Image (spheres, rainbow, N blue to C red):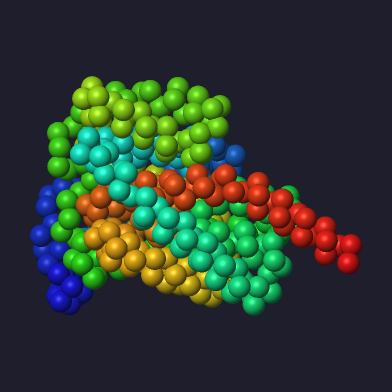
Amino acid sequence: MPSVPLLQRLKARASCLSPAHWLTAVMSLRAITSLKAATSLKADAPLRPLLTSLALGVVGGWLFQLTGMPLAWMLGPLVANLLGAMAGLKLGVPDRLRNLFLGVLGLTLGARVSPELVSHLSSWWLSALLLLAGVWASTLACAAWYRRCGFDATSAWFSSVPGALTAMVVIGERIGGDPQRIAVAQSLRVLLVIMILPPLYWVLEGAAGTPGIGSDVAVSGLWLIAVLPILLPLARRLRIPNASLLAPLLLALVLSLGDVVRFSPPVWGTDVMQLVLGCAIGARFKGLTPRVLVGVMGQSGVATLISLSVLGCFAELIHQLMGVPRDVAFLALAPGGIGEMALLAVALDLDPIFVAFHHLLRLIVLMLLLPVMARHFRHRRAREATQ
């Protein structure tokens, strides 16, 4: 619990390691050997970046698991790959592999929807309105900060919107923003939120004792994974937002509510899912040098704290007005990625559907408003050019 000194908790955790944990340790040591072998492959070997990334991830995941921290198999690989990328290693997780495991996460989330939970959707209108108001206030505050840091108006705004990272970079560049600044600011915000929240929940609430993902029910419905290679391309053709996550979530939701099948992977399967997703996030920062990181971390760090503070105030309103637990409300409004926040909610047993619903609503609204935002800034730049 929070009152127990961190060092004592780590010692207690180490003394209670099961044979399975030590087996993982041996695998991690072997992963170091495989890392050396991977880096010795020919430069054009297509699997080299992936093998290197996964080997680093196994080592990082095992080290973080020793602490008992939630999401150890996502945070460990993330940090290990971030450090590896900064050290100049060639890392990378193919988009197809990342999307496949995002699909597995979607299936896991959708399977947790029950008829009782669906009946509560109509009562979430107030939290939805507070979410949208919080996103607006947070964006304004962060944009003001980035303007003080020397960003132009377009880059400052598209760097501050909490969500739809890829769309913000692409649209921001089209209307004259600085794509590098937008991409770095958006990526670091997601990275910082992912790295701050799990340790924070762990320290403040003793979250290490929460059940693991998928540990509460029997393994079932694994055949749904075979549907993903067909489902994901179809969902993208239909222009479903965040298709890799949302389409499997909806499929698992319908099958679960219809009492057809409930997707429930084994615990080791969810660890692999976290491993791949953590590696994919960390490897995204390839080419980022320590010097550049230090230069932009301060700006993005302050912006992230501003966003967390503003959205935290609106989460407190949700807690006070609706009776939603404070930790659930805060996670539902946190300015991180929908997949990572929902995964954290599952790991901490914090109503993942409430969390995923609000992050999905934020994403959909942002995608609908993106053309309006682009038109506004395009006209603004045109007016400034004529003056």
Identify the residue at image location x=10%, y=60%: 16
Q: The N terminus appears in which quarter of the rendering?
A: bottom left
Identify the residue at image location x=46%, y=63%: 134
Q: Position of residue 279 (x, y in %)?
A: 43, 49
Q: The C terminus appears in which quarter of the rendering?
A: bottom right
Q: Does residue 246 appear anywhere in the picture?
A: yes
Identify the residue at image location x=77%, y=55%: 379
Residue at the extreme right of the image, as rendered: 386
Residue sitting nearer the eye, 126 or 99:
126
217, above or below 299, in the image: above
Residue sitting nearer the eye, 20 or 184:
184
Residue sitting nearer the eye, 223 or 153:
153
Query: Left or right: where does residue 231 sit relative to residue 303?
Result: left
Q: Position of residue 337 (x, y in %)?
A: 44, 52
Query: Left or right: where does residue 218 sit relative to residue 306?
Result: left
Residue sitting nearer the eye, 110 or 273:
110
**Mark count:** 0
355, above or below 108, in the image: below
Identify the residue at image location x=17%, y=51%: 211
Quarter of the image for residue 114 reads top left
Quarter of the image for residue 220 reads top left
Q: Position of residue 93 (x, y in %)?
A: 48, 43
Quarter of the image for residue 313 reads bottom left
Query: Left or right: where does residue 98 sit relative to residue 341?
Result: right
Q: Position of residue 2 (x, y in %)?
A: 18, 73
226, above or below 46, in the image: above
Q: Does residue 62 appear anywhere in the picture?
A: no
